Amino acid sequence: MASAVQSMRLCLRTASRRAAAPAAITPRQYLTIRSFSSTPLWRQPAARRDDDDVDELEDELEEIDQDEEDIDPVQFQRALEDLRRDGDYEKARQLQERIINNMGGTFTEAMRPPVTRQRNMFWGEEESDNDLLNDERGTDKFDEDDIMSMAHAKFEEFREFREYARIAAWQMPLLSKLATPFEPPTAQEPLRFRFTSYMGEFHPAEKKVVVEFSPRDLPLDEAQQQKLRKLLGPRWNPETDIAKMSCEQFEHPAQNKRYLGDLVNKLVEQAKDPTDMFEDVPLDTRHHTFKVKPKFPKEWRMTEERRKFLEDTREKILLLDQKKEEEGTLISGAEKIEAFFNPPRSASKTPEMAHHRLGRSLSAPPSRRQLLKH
C-alpha cells in the first residue's frame, strides 16, 4: 500500500511541473506607482498555486500512512477476508485494475519530458503535418515486422486497380450480350439532342442541352424551309445546312430539353404561316466564314495511260544502262565516291622545299644599299 501511495506521489510531482518557456529577452515588469495617501494599501490575495495543492495531497497521504501503522495486522486480515466474501468487492477490484491500467498512458505522458518547439529547424521534425491525411484512430502499436501506414495505403490502391482490371477482363465482355444493333433515326425523329454528364461528380455544365436539326428533315416545302433558314439567322450553318441551338437557363436537363422542343415547334409554326414568307428578305450568311479547302488536282491523278507511259520510259532507261555497261562507258557512282574519299598519294615535295629554305638562310644578308633600292 505504501509503495502505491509513493508512486502516486511521484507521478503527481512530475505532472505538476511546467515546461520552462524559452524567452530570449526577460519581460519587463510594470509596477503600479501608489499615490501619496495616509490609508493602508488594499490588494487582492495571491492566487493559489498548484504546489500548494500538491503539498496538501502529500499531507493527506502521510496521514493515511500513519493510520495504516496503527492498524492491527490480525484485524486487517479479518477485514480483508470479509471483503473477499462480499460480491461487490470483486467488481470494485476489477474496476480499480481497469482504471489503473487506463491511467498508465496518462502517467507516461505526464512523466515524459516536455518538447520545446525549435523555430529555427529546417525540416520541422516535431511539427504536425496538416496536409497528411492519415487516420490514426484505432491503430495498433507499430512493430518492426510490419510496414508503415502509408505503405499499406499504397497496397490498397494497387488492390483497387487490380479489381478494376479484373472487372474489365472478365465482366465487361459479358455486356456484349446486351448490345443492340444500331438503328438510324426515322423521319419522325428529326431532332438530335446532346447531353453532357460527368461520372461521379456534380458539374454546373450538366444542365446544358444542345439540339441539332436540318430544315430539309422537317415536314416543310421549299419556300417554308427557306423562311425557316431566315428565321434561324446565325444559328444556321449554310455549308452543312444544319441548325444548332442550346439552352442552360433551367436547373435540370429535362427542362432545357423541353424548352428547346417548344422553341423548334414555334419556329415551324412561324415558317408555315403564309401571312409573310419573307420573300423580299435575302438570306444572310455573313455570320459564317467559308473556308476553301485545297483539293488534289485532277490533272495529277494517276491514269492508265500515264502509268503505261512511265513503265515504258523506265524500261528504255534500263536497256540504255545495260548497253553502256557492256561497252564499259557506264559511270559507277560507287567508284567515284571511293576515289573522292581515298585519293592517290602524290610524291612528297618536302625535301625540295626544305633545301630551298636552307639555301636562303645560308646566303649573305642584303646590304643597306640594296635595301634602299628596293
Image (spheres, rainbow, N blue to C red):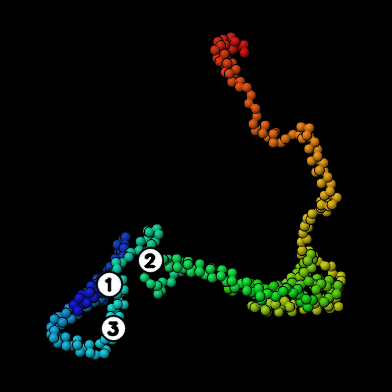
Please state if 33 lies on the left or on the right of 162 as rendered: left
Q: Earlier in the sequence, mark 1 or mark 3?
A: 1
Among all residues in the image, which is located at the extreme front? 326
Residue 15 is labelled as: 1
Q: Nearer the viewer, residue 50 or 239?
A: 239
Which of pointers 3 and 2 indicates the residue nearer the eye? 2
Which of pointers 1 and 3 indicates the residue nearer the eye? 3
Please state if 225 lies on the left or on the right of 55 as rendered: right
- What is the CA distance from the residue labelled 2 to the residue labelled 1? 34 Å
Which residue is pictured at 73% across the width and 73% down the height? 182
- What is the CA distance from the residue labelled 3 to the residue labelled 2? 34 Å
State the SS at label 3. helix
Which of pointers 2 and 1 indicates the residue nearer the eye? 2
Residue at numbered disc 2: 145
Q: Residues within 10 Å of mark 2 (few under 14, many from 20)?
A: few
| Quarter residue 234 falls in | bottom right
Q: Nearer the viewer, residue 346 or 88?
A: 346
Q: Is residue 346 above or below residue 144?
A: above
Q: Position of residue 178 (x, y in %)?
A: 66, 76
| Quarter residue 122 falls in | bottom left
Can residue 40 be seen here? The reply is no
Residue at numbered disc 3: 94
Q: Position of residue 25 (x, y in %)?
A: 31, 60
Q: Residues within 10 Å of mark 1 (few under 14, many from 20)?
A: some
Which residue is pictured at 67% across the width and 79% down the height? 254
Q: Give, as a three-letter code, the residue at label 2.
A: Asp
Which residue is pictured at 72% across the width and 74% down the height? 181
- What is the CA distance from the residue labelled 1 to the residue labelled 3? 26 Å
